[in-house]
Amino acid sequence: MQGKSSKTAQPDKTTQKRAEILAAAMDAFAENGYHATKISDIAQRLGMGHGTFYRYFENKLDIFISVIDLIIGKVASIVESDYPTATNSAGEYHQQIIRLGERIFEVFREDMRFGPILFYEALGVDPALNARMEALLDAIAQATELYFINGVKKGFLRQDLDTLILSKAITGVLVAGVRDVMSASDPEAVTKRWSRTIAGLMISGMS
Amino acid sequence: MQGKSSKTAQPDKTTQKRAEILAAAMDAFAENGYHATKISDIAQRLGMGHGTFYRYFENKLDIFISVIDLIIGKVASIVESDYPTATNSAGEYHQQIIRLGERIFEVFREDMRFGPILFYEALGVDPALNARMEALLDAIAQATELYFINGVKKGFLRQDLDTLILSKAITGVLVAGVRDVMSASDPEAVTKRWSRTIAGLMISGMS
Amino acid sequence: MQGKSSKTAQPDKTTQKRAEILAAAMDAFAENGYHATKISDIAQRLGMGHGTFYRYFENKLDIFISVIDLIIGKVASIVESDYPTATNSAGEYHQQIIRLGERIFEVFREDMRFGPILFYEALGVDPALNARMEALLDAIAQATELYFINGVKKGFLRQDLDTLILSKAITGVLVAGVRDVMSASDPEAVTKRWSRTIAGLMISGMS
Amino acid sequence: MQGKSSKTAQPDKTTQKRAEILAAAMDAFAENGYHATKISDIAQRLGMGHGTFYRYFENKLDIFISVIDLIIGKVASIVESDYPTATNSAGEYHQQIIRLGERIFEVFREDMRFGPILFYEALGVDPALNARMEALLDAIAQATELYFINGVKKGFLRQDLDTLILSKAITGVLVAGVRDVMSASDPEAVTKRWSRTIAGLMISGMS
DNA sequence: AATGAATGAGCGTTCATTCAT
DNA sequence: TATGAATGAACGCTCATTCAT
């Protein structure tokens, strides 16, 4: 039904090869970092000539940005897909917030390369990438702030909350949590502890 | 008196020169990052030959580690110097915690190079440095935990607090705060907002 | 009738395709020079795959030589087709010489790619090509010398003429003229001035 | 008397090394051409590391331009140093012109690398170099034209001379002569023949 | 016959490090 | 002790050429 109609090689093939290279690059970057990874390393992982790399990516920075964007995209899609819906009880409200955090944790637990790349390798490589990282954190913070603004309106939260700062603070907590979970020997259990702690902190502080 | 005593050299002179080079290196690393900074750049800032560099530091990584250690040391000294003293009232107790945070903020505001170097350039350069960063965060977290353990004992804080996770979470908040303040146009005002927000969050959560 | 006669293929088709590729290559070489022209550039101008190129030409140097040969051939055919015929008057004789020059000018004016390729790109690519260029200039010179030898015999020209050197000198004038005309804003007018100047120089020198 | 006063290495040393490298580069370019010459080839000729090259020249094109400029400079200095002085007889006048030509011949005979580099390798490498070559030829032509203008004024030459075109034509003759002499087995004798032929052509044409 | 994906030789350039002075 | 000239390992990237389809 599809046939070999297209004149230029099937775009599927190209797309798939790009994906393969991207995957190999992620492995390499996660293991050795941006600067210590050579294009030929990536090629070697796939058993292909290193010249082939340049048929699919502009240059080394290009593929690194692609890797970062892929990771950021995954996280961002979680964040963006989870808008604060109307809730009637404080309990329901808190659950929403907790679920958002847990989903973000999940993304990083699902692919253990994400953490190292995003938290160790992405920074200091290129100003544009630094900006992209900031943008991601801002996006998470903004999404979180929506919940807080909503909560203040509904009366679930204190009226004098500095929602902007608070959202950034919570984002910082999330980042710390993800990093901690990544390096834990029993990630699942640690994730639970973080969830509970975050919930407790947000709901009633430490008192 | 001066004569040929040069064999042992004046350790002061050596120490001072090291400090000068370190300072120049900090400027360079803060401005351009680790990989984009050349040894000759550092030497040039001091008007000295770049061969001289190697009389005071082993190699490039050596001085970068020294820079990082210097920064980490400043932060750590703040943290370590501020043991939780006996307090009798919850108010006094909270003030202690807030003051710790403010002092850390101060370190980064006093020297604007610390932030960029620590948060953007220090990572992804060398595994040993990554570990050192983790260690710093751990140290801050551990110090903070002391407060929490103390608070739990004294009865100021909830008995079911997961002090370990909580301390890491608060450390994450601190990091987020420092980063935010560093990039703010009015750092002083923003610092205030962070202080209040952190205090509020810790004392009574968001409710 | 068509059937499986493909083994011998239509030589016409092959010849025509070769010509097309050659034309595209000339454009490319004239615009960007030999080293800056990629095989894929040539293919792209024809909308064909660059692998196809190798079905019609051995390699990059092969087609460049073909281009040069084509140009040289055009010039040489002019030169060779114009043998010094018997002339009875000095006037007729001079006209012959002038006409030869004008025809050569014409070849380069007709196809503006010839000049840049022959005078800027052909040299320094390959020893064999350098030799071919020399051969062309020699051929022109030799043809010209025939006129001079003829003129000496007939008594139109000085008996002590060094016809070999003179023919090379006149060839040099021609080359200079072609280059000058190529870059002139009003080629036609400039051509006229060259014709007159060459004629004057040859007939009576500068006195 | 000079001492080792200068802080940075003697500029003499640097200048000399630059000259050495330039000389080696000239050899290499003359033998193999621009594109076939590798930086490491040049370094190897001097028994030095190829990294050293970059302490003295920006890059490959830089040194090639330097080589070309050196050659052009030699030729240009000949041309510029030889202004048409006041002459009273036509004989004296013609001698001046002939001497100019002979001096140019001499430059290329003195250093046999000049010809191949200037006439074969300099073109088609870089637009800027093409322009420089044109400029050189223009300079020679302009200098020559001064003689002609002077000759016309003094009445030695025809009043209707197209001095501009004529100067370019004579420059073309010179170039052809230099090329011919370069490849001759007995350059000295051939040079003589060219001198006489050029003189004859200019004085009385071929008649 | 036509294609274009794959290849890898090849080269320019950088810069941390050494060491003779 | 200070210097900076010299070094060469290292790597990103290009593109002519091949060949399976």
Image (spheres, coloured by chain):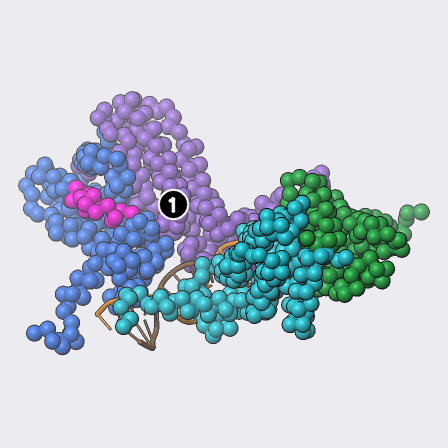
Chain colours: A purple, B blue, C green, D cyan, E brown, F orange
- Left-right relation of D188 to B54: right
Work out whether residue A104 or residue C48 is closer to the camera in this orientation and state it. Answer: C48
Going 10% across and 36% down the picture, which residue do you hit?
B91
- Amino acid type at mark 1: Pro
- Left-right relation of C101 to D123: right
What's drawn in magenta, residue-wise? B100-117
Could you tell me residue C95's position as x and y percent? 81, 49
Going 30% across and 29% down the picture, which residue do you hit?
A148
Residue tagged 1:
A127
Could you tell me residue A87's position as x and y percent? 35, 24
Residue D198 appears in the picture as rendered: yes
Q: Is residue A137 above or below residue B80?
A: above
Subunit of mark 1? A
Indicate yes or no whether the magenta region holds residue D118.
no
- Left-right relation of A109 to D185: left
Could you tell me residue A58's position as x and y percent? 53, 48
- Left-right relation of C99 to A171: right
Indicate yes or no whether the magenta region holds residue B103.
yes
Q: Is residue C186 above or below residue D118?
A: above
